[in-house]
């Protein structure tokens, strides 16, 4: 019996909580996976898994063996990576999941750079505003905002999002300009609701260094980032969006900032990955690359458009329709109808709330 393969199969079965899903992810017949686990238990002389028709559970011996296997497999991968030429030898499939707006406006425009550095890595990019089960869906890493809630994941902070409260001139002409936090209760908001719970995300402001939530009346609620921004532009109500998303509309006059003296809380953005994959060379390479990408733009690293470095920020330039350093000298794609920017929905890093859930899964 190949003990190393047996460890890999055992870890995958536990992570996937299914023999069938583990077999599919390893491209092995289910019967082969079952036989490997049975032979492994026979070799060790202990029962590793409790099996029922509905679920799989670790025995105490299985839990201990699982932890050892995770460390051994990670050590092997790390050792092999040390003796490889990282940029040239990295290869294989890397599955990541990101909010739609991050993917469309930040990652995809820069993917040629990643491909140039790691030409043999097949990047599988999932886009969406829904939470994913990283283990069951075989996702290597995700980009999310907010505090880490799942202790089985490792988080590396790569940036910060600042949120702005704003409204369209049409809305302000009809309802007036809010002057105080208290006056917001007389206004209407576009709500962003979580598909998983149906809850609207709370409106949050930082007042005298403290977080303050405001109950807002709403005329419409959506659960898709681009639609949320569109509703604000059309005058349905006040919105809270990531500043770099709103900036082109603020500068064109399509949106007007509301209560600039009381800004919404900023939110940390992180790359998350399972502990069992924390030493994966492909995950490390992608994390280093995306961290550098965010650090290069003030609007994604906690600064604003007044920072001198803003002129070299590719995200800022693309938002304003300016050629960036990566696109100078190359044919420029013209925007197509219906390709409006999406929203980065953010939330304050504090106690768990509907708004924090939105930040974690939808940005």
Image (cartoon, grey):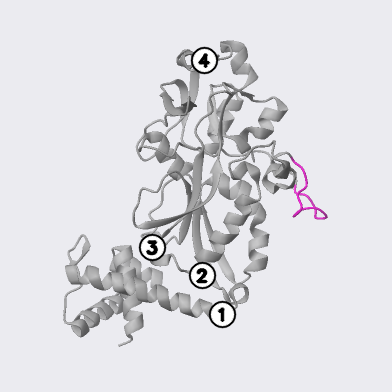
For label 1, the crowd category at 10 Å Cα-Cα, with few meaning under 14, some 14 to 19 and many 20 or more, is few
Secondary structure beneath label 4: loop
Q: CA distance from mark 1 to mark 3?
A: 23 Å
Q: Mark 1 and mark 2 in contact (Cβ < 8 Å)? A: yes
Q: For this rendering, which residue is in front, 140 or 335?
A: 140
Q: Is residue 328 magenta?
A: yes
Q: CA distance from mark 4 to mark 3?
A: 45 Å
At x 50%, y 58%, the residue is: 96
On the rendered structure, is 216 left or right of 59?
A: right
On the rendered structure, is 11 left or right of 320?
A: left
> Which residues are drawn in magenta?
321-333
Give the residue at mark 2. Answer: 281
Give the residue at mark 3. Answer: 275
Q: Is residue 139 magenta?
A: no
Mark on residue 180? 4
In this rendering, does residue 246 appear at all? yes
Give the residue at mark 1. Answer: 84
Secondary structure beneath label 1: loop
In the rendered view, would you say 246 is above or below 327? Answer: above
Which badge, 3 or 2, is on the more N-terminal residue? Answer: 3
At x 59%, y 17%, the residue is: 171
When asked about the image quadrant of residue 211, the answer is top left
At x 56%, y 65%, the residue is: 285
Extreme-right residue of the structure: 329
For label 3, the crowd category at 10 Å Cα-Cα, with few meaning under 14, some 14 to 19 and many 20 or more, is some
């Amino acid at each position: 019996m190949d003990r190393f393969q047996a460890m890999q199969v055992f870890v995958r079965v536990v992570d996937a909580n299914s023999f069938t899903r583990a077999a599919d992810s390893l491209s092995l017949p289910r019967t082969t996976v079952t036989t490997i686990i049975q032979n492994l238990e026979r070799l060790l002389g202990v029962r590793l898994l409790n099996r029922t028709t509905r679920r799989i559970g670790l025995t105490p011996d299985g839990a201990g063996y699982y932890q050892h296997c995770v460390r051994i497999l990670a050590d092997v991968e790390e050792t092999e990576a040390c003796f490889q030429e990282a940029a040239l030898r990295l290869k294989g499939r890397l599955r990541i999941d990101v909010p739609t707006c991050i993917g469309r406006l930040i990652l995809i425009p820069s993917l040629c750079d990643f491909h140039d550095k790691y030409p043999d890595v097949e990047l599988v990019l999932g886009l969406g505003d829904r939470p994913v089960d990283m283990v069951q869906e075989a996702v290597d890493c995700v980009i999310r905002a907010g505090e880490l809630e799942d202790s089985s994941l490792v988080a590396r902070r790569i940036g910060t999002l600042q949120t702005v409260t704003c409204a369209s001139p049409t809305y302000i002409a009809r309802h007036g300009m809010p002057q105080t936090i208290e006056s917001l209760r007389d206004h209407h908001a576009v709500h962003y609701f979580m598909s998983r719970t149906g809850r609207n995300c709370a409106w949050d402001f930082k007042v005298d260094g403290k977080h303050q939530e405001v109950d807002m009346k709403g005329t419409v609620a959506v659960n898709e980032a681009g639609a949320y921004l569109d509703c604000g532009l059309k005058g349905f109500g006040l919105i809270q969006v990531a500043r770099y998303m709103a900036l082109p509309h603020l500068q064109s006059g399509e949106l007007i900032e509301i209560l600039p003296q009381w800004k919404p809380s900023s939110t940390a953005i992180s790359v998350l990955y399972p502990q069992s994959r924390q030493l994966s060379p492909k995950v490390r390479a992608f994390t280093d690359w995306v961290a550098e990408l965010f650090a290069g733009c003030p609007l994604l690293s906690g600064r604003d458009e007044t920072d001198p470095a803003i002129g070299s920020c590719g995200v800022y330039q693309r938002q304003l329709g300016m050629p960036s350093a990566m696109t100078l000298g190359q044919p420029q794609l013209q925007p197509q109808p219906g390709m409006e920017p999406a929203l980065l929905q953010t939330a304050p890093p504090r106690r768990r709330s509907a708004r924090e859930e939105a930040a974690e899964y939808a940005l």
